[in-house]
Image (cartoon, rainbow, N blue to C red):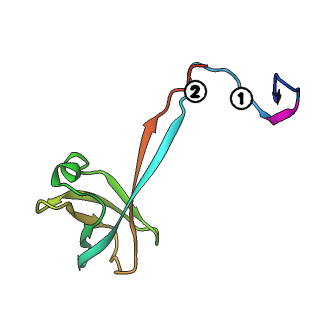
Amino acid sequence: TPAIVFRVSDGRLVATGYSETMDADRIVLKRVTLTGYPFRIHKRMVVVRWMFFFASDADALRRAKLVTKFGLDGEILGPLGTHGLVRCSFSEHVTHKDTVCLHLYKRVFPKAV
């Protein structure tokens, strides 16, 4: 349904747009993308750095799905060392100029007005 919002004090137009139906089953998600870069490459096994800072972060996201900018799919196998390096496995050979992305989703609740 169309929506028009006016300022109360002087009646000026503030915003226009559409509002979706009010459905209790609707879920609003926020997506955050963590990126890292290949550090060591051995065929399909890659060590990625600059995605995490601690090994515990990488261990919590073990078996998470990864994608690269060139469209390859992979997953996190586990942490390597204590400084946030991650061992990953991919479907094809990864190049050094590729970027590894991990998409994380979080449910967002509307603010109470």
Q: Are marks 2 and 1 in contact (CB under 8 Å)?
A: yes
User: Residue at the location (70% across, 24% down)?
Assistant: 21
| Amino acid type of the residue tagged 2 in the rendering | Arg
Q: Residue lying furthest left in this view? A: 81
Magenta includes 15? yes
Q: Residue lying furthest front in this view? A: 9
> With respect to residue 65, does 93 lie above or below?
below
Give the percent coordinates (x, y) of residue 90: 31, 67
Specify whether 2 is left or right of 97: right
Residue that carries the numbered disc 1 in the rendered image:
20
Main SS class of the magenta portion in the image: strand
User: Residue at the location (34% across, 73% down)?
Assistant: 92
Specify whether 100 is left or right of 43: right
Magenta includes 86? no
Specify whether 109 is left or right of 23: left
Q: Residues within 10 Å of mark 2 (few under 14, many from 20)?
A: few
Can you say which quadrant of the picture contains the N terminus?
top right
| Quarter-of-image position of residue 33 | bottom left
Residues in magenta, as a range: 12-16
Specify whether 77 is left or right of 28: left
Q: Earlier in the sequence, mark 2 or mark 1?
A: 1
Give the percent coordinates (x, y) of residue 103: 42, 52
Residue that carries the numbered disc 2 in the rendered image:
26
Give the percent coordinates (x, y) of residue 53: 23, 57
Q: Secondary structure at mark 2?
A: loop
| Amino acid type of the residue tagged 1 in the rendering | Glu
